[in-house]
Image (cartoon, grey):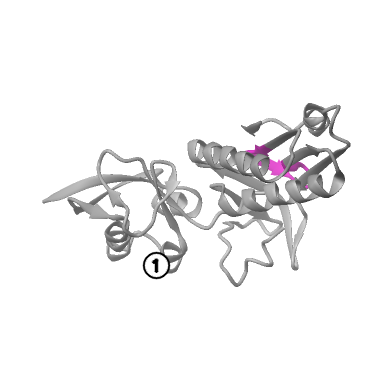
Amino acid sequence: MIELTRDPIDFQALTERVRRPHCGAVVLFLGTVRDLTGAQVTVALDYEAYPGMAEKKMAEIEADVRRRWPVGEVAMIHRLGHLEVSEISVAAAVSCPHRAQAFEACRHAIDRLKELVPIWKKENWADGTSEWVHPSAESGTRNAE
Amino acid sequence: MMQTVRVQLFARFRDLFGADLIEVKVNAPATVRELRDALVSRNLGPTALLTRSRIAVNNEFAGETTPVSAADEIALIPPVSGG
């Protein structure tokens, strides 16, 4: 299950949605708006997507996760629009029979999402300026989380 | 013979051009590489960011030799930052 939404992410409902009787492990990842990037203070982020392609890429990631791990259910939601500090921008939930599989599968899902899905964020800094984040290879580490 | 392809813009490119769609004249037939060269030569944005951007054709990341035509859905995809 994949979704782009402009509404707040209900991560409890998402977690319930992936629980399965044969899965003894559920891993949930939440990405939240962080207030500091280096020394720069963020007051809010704006997210936008290329919707059709973003949904296609998320569906491909879901299929890839299902191929590689014994997934009970996998769900990914990304929020779009204006988000304040501490709000949830992305959630990925995976259930598997055992925890090692669930951790690996969830890690893979969020890593691929950040690498492949055409979604962008604009930083709104505390000094009133803003800038789209387009990580380069060099700054990739700084912008990786 | 020339053709006009339409390229969807996002994020910094959309802000730079003040548009979410631009029309670009390229040869017919043309490849993704030729489209990228046309974007660079027409000063359609910062060359460094253009060079780091991918081009999607019909919702799939395209290689440099992928053909592009007026019938395709084309998008300029700067480095992504979701998550």
Q: Label 1's element?
A: helix
In the image: residue A131, left or right of residue B38: right
In the image: residue A12, left or right of residue B42: right
Dot 1: chain letter: B
Residue drawn at (41%, 62%), measured in percent from left and top? B50
Which quadrant of the figure contains the C terminus of chain A? bottom right
Q: Which of A133/A73 is in front?
A: A73
Residue type marked 1: Thr
Q: Is residue A95 above or below residue A123?
A: above
Q: Which of the 4 quarters of the picture holds residue A63?
A: top right
Crowd tier of the residue under label 1, counting other residues whose Cα lies within 10 Å: few below 14, some 14–19, many 20 or above: some
> For the view shown, which residue lies furthest in the bottom direction?
A138
Which quadrant of the figure contains the N terminus of chain A? top right
Q: Is residue A38 above or below residue A127?
A: below
> Which residue lies under the disc numbered 1?
B47
Q: Which of A142/A74 is in front?
A: A74
Q: Position of residue B17 (x, y in %)?
A: 39, 52
Magenta residues? A77-90
